[in-house]
Image (tube, grey):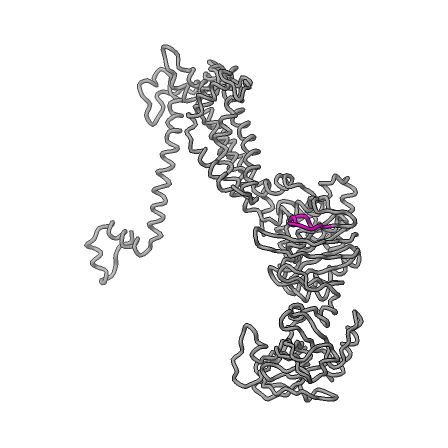
Amino acid sequence: MSQPTGTERSDDETRGPLSNWVDSAIKNPKKVYRAMFYVVVIFFLFTTLFPLYWLTMIALSNSNRVSEGVGLLPAGFDPSSFVEIFQQIPLHLYLFNSFVFATLTTIFVLIVASLAGYAFGRLEFRGKRTLLLTVLIISFFPPAAFFIPLFQLFTQQIAFLGLTPPELYSTPGGVVVPLSAIFMPLAIFILTTFYSQIPDGLEDAARIEGTTRLGALFRVIIPLSAPGVATAGILTFIAVYNEFFFSFLMTGTAAQDWAPIVDGIISYQSQFQVRYDLMAAASIVAVVPVAILVVVAQEKIVSGLTSGALKE
Amino acid sequence: MATITLQDIRKKYGSDVAIEGINLDIRDGEFVTLVGPSGCGKSTTIEMIAGLTKPTSGTVSIGERDVTALPPKDRGIAMVFQNIALFPHKNVYDNISFGLQLRNFDKAEMDRRVEDAANTVQLSGMLDRMPSEMSGGQRQRVAIARAIVREPDVFLMDEPLANLDAELRVHMRTQLQRIHNKLDTTIVYVTHDQAQAMTMSDRIAVLNDGELQQIDPPLVCYHEPANRFVAGFIGSPAMNFISGEITTDGFRSDSGHGDVEFDPAAIGVQAGQDVTLGVRPEHVIPVDEAVGDVTDTIETYTDVIEPMGDEIFVYLVTSKGETVDMEDPSASGQILMNVGPGTDVAENQELSVVFDKTNLHLFDAETEEALAHGLSEPVRVDTSVDTSADSEVSSDDD
């Protein structure tokens, strides 16, 4: 705060520092925006990062002292829980299962949503709006509403159009199929927006040069929409990796039955004790590598494919 | 190399008719320019030849093949676009060789062809660059290289020079002509710029409102326009039009200025017919400079004078202080005159002018079809008219 000086501004001396700050903020509104920016950012960082911090503290605590309560610092110091999580159960297999679900779903969603996004974003056809709205409406349904019929279908309890489907329960298909459908609308909307922005001339040029429409999509439109494809892909990947409901219920509880991470974490809870420190350690192990992977992948994908920079 | 034949091509967008039954025969190795104002259907026409747009009815043939139902990649064509349309994520080499890569050419052959094409457009040594690192003219040359590298039967160019600055446009214009001379490929070129059409083409196809107005060599379109639209569109600055009617001893304008005496029977028009007289600015001559039998002088006042260096545009009005209707300047008595740089003219002066009768055009007021070209000695020769007409003009100009 600058001190009021000079005889003309002597009335400032009778006011407090807050009044002075408000006074200068009115003259210079940018100051307020900057202050608000920091308040919001700090609040956001605190609410998102503090749970992760506290989780780490629990993981580092001595297993016997966790029940006493963990504050800002670990209760005792015992990093061995990061090793123990792999000794008690095959956590790496659970991680692998979740990873497979997320990867397969992402690939499937990107392919199908690319085709849909091309049609919605670049073609004119009758009923386009209606169809797009239908996709949107479907995404409003709570996923749980699909669960019971799908469970019956995947466990071969009912027939579909007179056909009994293969038993998808406890296979990646049982998770990938419903989750692809659930996360598809978002990807379609993202890709529609991006694909519609590629100039028609580029697609025309590719077709003249010798591609089909589909070829132009994969050779020109998708590479040029890399940021959009990366966004849709990463959102889908994270959503499926974090998904609880279908991945938990459509699979068994053992790693061999394609159980996801959640099953692994829950199995640290036995009849007589709950190992919070192991659960916390397993959560961190599950989250951090994927977070790093996603950040790196995003940088790579986006910078690698847009190095030419679209300039029309 | 191939011929292109459009047979009764129509294109409708919903209920809007974009193309109204066009028939076009383009010969092998010919450079044909489709020219017309915005929205006349020239781009739609070239897109239908390319296969990017499907005609509502009619057939497109390239060579002897009916390609109406074929996708663009199977038509043996290459195209250069107005917005250049290089693939921004590929470098120059990959842009040029994109079509060859799709056709699985082997590496050595591809290198040789890309090198050749790059040399033709003077781009050698830039094959590693990205399009974003190049200037507009260089990018346009990459686009042309991408088109010639596949050695297509037909080249389609949709306003390829429209996005370049004026200097570069003139330069690329000569480049394109050299490429055409070298490759001898059939070229269909679209532009709204009649200067490009005049300078480059073997024949010009003038389109308006989705209909073909005239297809002829540039100078025939210039000297013998088929109708009033072609007359007004080809030539810069545009032709003056004066409406009036035919009397027994010639043309009488509605405004009373610009009457011309001639024998109507000699050129096959009838007295009483409503017509429009067309005269190009360079065929309006100050009386002082005219030689020979000067009749039908028109008393005018100079209005605005635009010295262009090599020529002077003089806007003449038939009465002082008259307001000029911007929509149709000729109707309110404005005549544009184009004289040599040495001519002594000043603003707001009286000036008597005459029309060079050998280069007047008469159009039917209603159908706008041309009735006659050249009123004193109506010559109706085909292509050879250019030279004879030109020499007569110069003798009058002296």
Q: Give coordinates of residue B190: x percent, y percent.
A: 67, 58
Q: Any magenta on residue B308? A: no
Q: Residue at x 46, y 15 (%)?
A: A253
Residue B290 sits in quarter: bottom right
Q: Any magenta on residue B59? A: yes
Q: How many marks?
A: 0
Please indicate, yes or no, whether residue B345 appears anywhere in the rendered image: yes
Q: Residue at x 41, y 29 (%)?
A: A142
In this rendered view, identify the residue nearer to me: A101 or B301. Answer: B301
Q: Give coordinates of residue B235: x percent, y percent.
A: 67, 71
Q: Residue at x 52, y 82 (%)?
A: B322
Quadrant placement of the C terminus of chain B: bottom right
Where A239 sits versus B219, above or below?
Answer: above
Please indicate, yes or no, whether residue B237 appears anywhere in the rendered image: no
Q: Give coordinates of residue B265: x percent, y percent.
A: 73, 80
Outermost residue toward the top? A272
Q: Give coordinates of residue B261: x percent, y percent.
A: 69, 85
Where B291 sits versus B175, above or below?
Answer: below
Where A147 sits versus A133, above or below?
Answer: above
Outermost residue toward the left? A14
In this rendered view, identify the residue nearer to me: B190 or B184. Answer: B190
Where A46 sits versus B281, above or below?
Answer: above
In this rendered view, identify the residue nearer to me: A281 or B22. Answer: B22
Report the magenta residues as a range. B50-60
